[in-house]
Image (spheres, grey):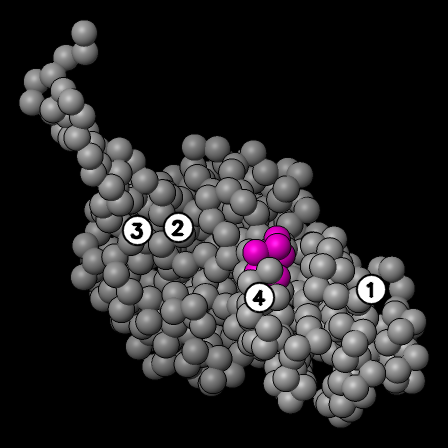
Amino acid sequence: MKAEIINLQGEVREWMHAIGRRARAAYALMAEATNEQKDMALVQAAMALREHQHLILEANALDVEFGREKGLDAAQIDRLKLDAKRIEAMAVGLETVATLPDPVNKKFDEWSRPNGLVLQRVSIPLGVVGMIYESRPNVTADAAGLCIKSGNAVILRGGSESFHSSNAIAEYIHHGLKAAGLPQDAVQLVPTRDRAAVGEMLSMIGLIDVIIPRGGQSLTKRVQEESRVPTLLHLEGNCHTYIHKAADAGMAKDVLLNAKMRRTGICGATESLVIDEEVASAMLPGIADALAKAGCEMRGDEKACAIDKRIKKATEEDWDTEYLAPIISIKVVKDADEAIAHINRHGSHHTDAIITNDTLTAHHFLRKVDSAIVMHNTSTQFADGSEFGFGAEIGIATGRLHARGPVGAEQLTTYKYVVHGNGQVRP
């Protein structure tokens, strides 16, 4: 299934503004859609994804071929590639989002004033979301589904490598919208690989209400520097697992191996192991055995290298690196405070975990580590909207404004104040 790539021939602004105007009109209808309509759209879209799985895989094969010709590495190809299992996961994600409570028109608070005014704070959609992402085609389904549920319209600009896959997925999202009597313009894909379209999206004040980038450092940096539209940032996932001296050795090894090696190319993968020196000599060799057997390269500080010769000498750059590959850095620390300081200095404030049976130390870590997600005795690979019960996610927000952590349907809403009176005038 080959999508048409349009050559905009210098007309990027006109094309993008036309898309923006259609999205704006669609948002006005989506904001008034019933929960039943939105859920029907999601369920019907899920059915269409399953029914046309073979066509999505055909489109994805074109993208994988393009990616290999472009020189993508193994981790990038893995993020790009679809199979039956991943398509089923997209469909299940849409169906799960449909089962969630409607995040729109939720009354957060209500109070009265002495003059008889009654005030309410009520949730509403954000408006038109501009989503800029790289090679993962499943983001197309996740972003579309969450925006539908939250009553938003969305303009999707996927990576050039996933062009055909994203268009195929969007076509079946449109099937769902049409079946529910909702505007298909609520979900639009930018029909070109031209990078100028990204620049235009970043300047579409009044047509796009929020930009959400999801991708590597270069994309996020560009959005930070150039966007005139408010942004909800998803930064890189330089995640840590800290093994405290009171950790169970078996649990620590199993959790760390999963956190690093289950899927190395996702933002929730652990990139750095931090371990107390009191237990490093006893625990590191077994952990290194498991990592080496799984094909993971290890880079550590002097203490780690001295404990196991398979660990190569780390550079300062390693502590700040999101590898997205079977490579891990290893830091040996004196205690929890040194571990926390190391994580806060070198981490990306995405997801960090502690493995310990010491409850007080765990609470200290969870309070002091300045990340969007902090975990105790579990794998950082659970840093995912579907694992949080959100059905899907549009990204992991690592900033401090509006939303933090997995961004699901509820995080794609804002609120307004509704004031009821009976003729009051202000003196």
Q: Please provide percent x and percent y for residue 237.
A: 65, 62
Look at the picture and state if 416 lies above or below 317. Answer: above
Q: Residues within 10 Å of mark 1 (few under 14, many from 20)?
A: some
Q: Main secondary structure of the magenta part?
A: helix
CB of mark 2 within 8 Å of CB of mark 3?
no
Look at the picture and state if 26 lies above or below 376. Answer: above
Q: Residues within 10 Å of mark 2 (few under 14, many from 20)?
A: many
Splitting the image into 4 quarters, where does residue 338 fall?
A: bottom right
Look at the picture and state if 282 lies above or below 336. Answer: below
Residue found 56% across the figure and 34% down from its top: 228
CB of mark 1 within 8 Å of CB of mark 4?
no
Inter-mark Cα distance, 4 to 3: 43 Å
CB of mark 1 within 8 Å of CB of mark 2?
no
Q: Please provide percent x and percent y for residue 370.
A: 61, 53
Residue found 23% across the figure and 66% down from its top: 40
Q: Please provide percent x and percent y for residue 80.
A: 60, 72
Is disc 2 placed on a helix, strand or loop?
helix
Which residues make up the magenta segment?
Answer: 365-370
**Which of pointers 3 and 1 lies earlier in the amino acid sequence?**
3
Residue tagged 2: 412
- Please give the label number shown on residue 360: 4
Is disc 4 placed on a helix, strand or loop?
helix
Inter-mark Cα distance, 1 to 4: 30 Å
Amino acid type assigned to the residue bearing label 4 in the image: Leu
Inter-mark Cα distance, 2 to 3: 9 Å
